[in-house]
Image (cartoon, helix red, strand yellow):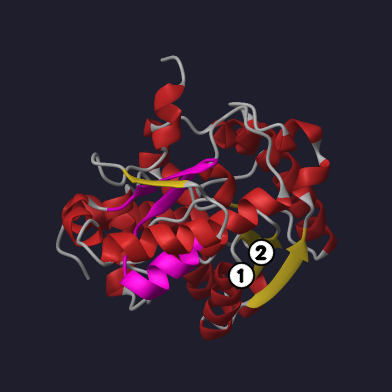
Amino acid sequence: MNDDPGLTAKVTTLHQIIRELDRAAVAYSGGVDSTLLLAVCRELLGRDGVLALTVQSEFVPATEVAEAETLAQQLDVRHLVFPFNLLNESEIAANPPDRCYYCKRLLFSQLLDIARAEGFPVLLHGANVDDTGDYRPGMRAAEELGVRAPLLEAGFAKADVRTLSREMGLPTWDRPALACLASRVPYGTPLSVEVLARIDAAEGWLRARLGVAQLRVRDHFPLARLEVPVADIARLAQPGVREEIAAHLRDLGYQYVTLDLEGFRSGSLNETLPH
């Protein structure tokens, strides 16, 4: 176990929170945070005491849902996948700055209903302390509905989540941060199946072709703005690589392709919002 007394105290608090629940459902994306939360619940509550619930929608790449299914099997957790058509909701499809509030309010409400119908009175999600440092209107929806965030309650930062995940042997410990595809579209630009599929196709190809795990294709259509870690910028800008990227993204419908010189940063579209 990690010899950091601060992390040890957080783990003790997390275990106390989980044990007091008796039975719990976890809103499960397959990312580093929710996988750690699910693994701890499985360890402390047993197989019959935990249920993983995953959303399948246009906002989530199909590969992520498949990975969540595989991870849930590896953790020996009962796992249910539910399709949601989020674009039917005008407050979501219009993509206002508080879109995430409406989206999480809808998803958590329905997941709560599903969890309770399956005999699980409590729904958990994987937010951590770092999530409070950015604009996250979806957190408000969780609080209003009583969806708990044990990692946050126990004081876990993202670095703590990764450290404990590695110690527990979870394959997600170094997985890049995930975010829904809608987070690539500037606020006020309407969302559609076509827009989200275009982004998914662009990012999927870039990851497979170039091996860049952490990236975003910000969709300022007809312009694509690529964010990658600063260390990868020079490689993507090399002759040959640059032309190949531009040609492929043009095939997907973009007319212009740019490489953001500031590099990858989570939630960069929030920079346009008033403080």
Please report whichever mark, 1 or 2, sits nearer to the chain's N-terminal start.
2
Q: Nearer the viewer, residue 69 or 207?
A: 207
Q: Is residue 130 above or below residue 91?
A: below
State the image coordinates of residue 146 (x, y, percent, origin top left). 66, 39
The residue lying at 72 percent from left, 36 percent from top is 92
Residue furthest top in the image: 274
Q: Nearer the viewer, residue 56 or 44?
A: 56
Secondary structure under the numbered disc 1 in the rendered image: helix
Instruction: Give, as a three-letter code, the residue at label 2.
Output: Thr
Q: Nearer the viewer, residue 2 or 33?
A: 33
Q: Is residue 36 above or below residue 223?
A: below
State the image coordinates of residue 100 (x, y, percent, origin top left). 61, 36
Q: Is residue 187 rendered to the left or right of residue 247?
A: right
Could you tell me how far apart the alpha carbons at marks 1 and 2 are, in whole angstroms? 7 Å
Label 2: few (<14), some (14–19) or many (≥20) C-alpha neighbours in 10 Å = many
Which of the 4 image quadrants contains residue 16?
bottom left
Residue 223 highlighted magenta (yes or no): yes
Q: Is residue 105 above or below residue 170?
A: above
Label 1: which residue? 65
Label 2: which residue? 54
**What is the span of residues highlighted in magenta in the rendered image?**
202-228
- Residue contact between numbered discs 1 and 2, judged by CB atoms under 8 Å: yes
Instruction: Give, as a three-letter code, the residue at label 1.
Output: Val
Q: Is residue 105 above or below residue 271?
A: below
The residue lying at 80 percent from left, 33 percent from top is 90
The residue lying at 39 percent from left, 36 percent from top is 268
Residue 94 highlighted magenta (yes or no): no
State the image coordinates of residue 181 (x, y, percent, origin top left). 56, 51
